[in-house]
Amino acid sequence: MNVEEFIPGKYSEAVEKGSVKWQSPSNIALVKYWGKKPEQIPANPSVSFTLSNCKTITRVDFIKKKTRDKFEFEVFFEGEKKDDFKPKISTFFKRIESYCPFLKEYSFKIYSENTFPHSSGIASSASGMSALALCIMSIEKQLNPSLSAEFFKKKASFLSRLGSGSACRSIEGELVVWGEHEEIKGSSELFGVSYPDEVHENFRNYQDTILLVDKGKKEVSSSVGHDLMHGHPFAEARFKQAGANLANLIPVFAEGNLEKFMEIVENEALSLHAMMMSSRPYFILMKPNTLEIINKIWKFRRQSQLPVCFTLDAGANVHVLYPEKNKTEIFEFIKNELVASCENGQYICDQLGSGAKEIK
Ligand code: PMV
């Protein structure tokens, strides 16, 4: 598919006003996207687990306006009017305008809330941007009811990507690939696709306990982070490594080889942080408690032989990943030994999820 296919022809219906609502989850990358080309094209392919409990719920009310010279919208987050969210949404609307020309014809009220605590240090851009993109697609569907379900999902992911790269992996579940990979059929630079190959039952309801080590605002925005990969001395090697790690995950997913899974996932997390530590300017986004937790996980894994591992995003929080089958023992360990390293003892229990849902 190429981008032209997302530019609509004439809409068949005239719609005066309406309201649409979606909930969309966050996702956690196993192979990380870090570095991009223009138009939010990823420098390497990535794969993620779609989460289940960490979600954004967004309702968009829309009404036709008389002029079509500019975007008109108001944003409310958890009941409060949020003018500081407007520039990001304006940029998003500008980027997607040619694919959704109706945006200037309506006035919008956007009401959003997250199921996870505000300022938890959890990136809400994936769930937030995908929920908004899905609402926009629901409006497009009213204007053109002949859109197929398949196209709807693809375009929702395509639009989400233009809002925030990793958001394109939040539309579907349970494993989503974004970025072209020769061994993954249907994979695309333009949108995320549900992982098409076999996934072993070891991964069913895979658990993710998110340890909130530092709830502050991100020290380095991901757009600054992605930019630092331009001219990074290890960039090419890193992009190759991500492709190879994704290729190596294919038999791991099929066979349920948890040893290999944990090795690849932790290698990805540490490689992502190694890129930040070796860029100019350089950053350390882990905190002392991040390392404390990692060391405790490694020690517990050695002693118990249980399949628990970690991953990180671009921050200090730790995602602890483990199979549902071992939930009791591993969650006991998390509560007894890891939660003390969280800010105010806060953590979130999540697990693999099936993707976004429309709320009627
Ligand atoms: O989608 P962005 O631009 O916020 O970048 C996300 C980058 C990571 O979370 C670090 C990795 C990933 O693949 O999600």
Image (cartoon, grey):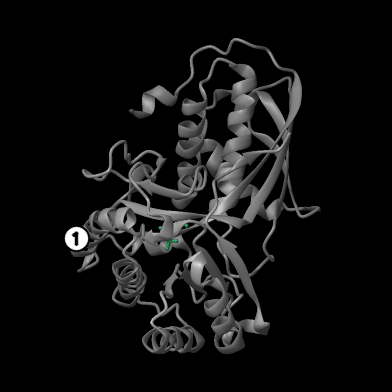
Task: Please provide percent x and percent y for residue 93.
Answer: 56, 37
Task: Please provide percent x and percent y for residue 310.
Answer: 43, 74
State the residue at coordinates (65%, 51%).
Answer: 56
The reply to whether residue 99 is visible in this rendering is no
Residue holding disc 1? 236
Q: Residues within 10 Å of mark 1 (few under 14, many from 20)?
A: some
In front here: 28 or 160? Answer: 28
In front here: 324 or 46? Answer: 324
In front here: 69 or 216? Answer: 216
Task: Please provide percent x and percent y for residue 311.
Answer: 42, 70
Taking the image as shown, residue 47 lies to the left or right of residue 18, namely left
Taking the image as shown, residue 327 lies to the left or right of residue 36, namely right
Taking the image as shown, residue 167 lies to the left or right of residue 77, namely left
Task: Please provide percent x and percent y for residue 109.
Answer: 74, 38
Q: Amino acid at mark 1?
A: Glu
Q: Residue furthest right?
A: 79
Quarter holding residue 259: bottom left
State the residue at coordinates (60%, 22%).
Answer: 141
State the residue at coordinates (35%, 41%).
Answer: 196
The reply to whether residue 175 is visible in this rendering is yes
Query: How many marks overall?
Result: 1
Q: With respect to residue 14, does 37 lie above or below?
A: below
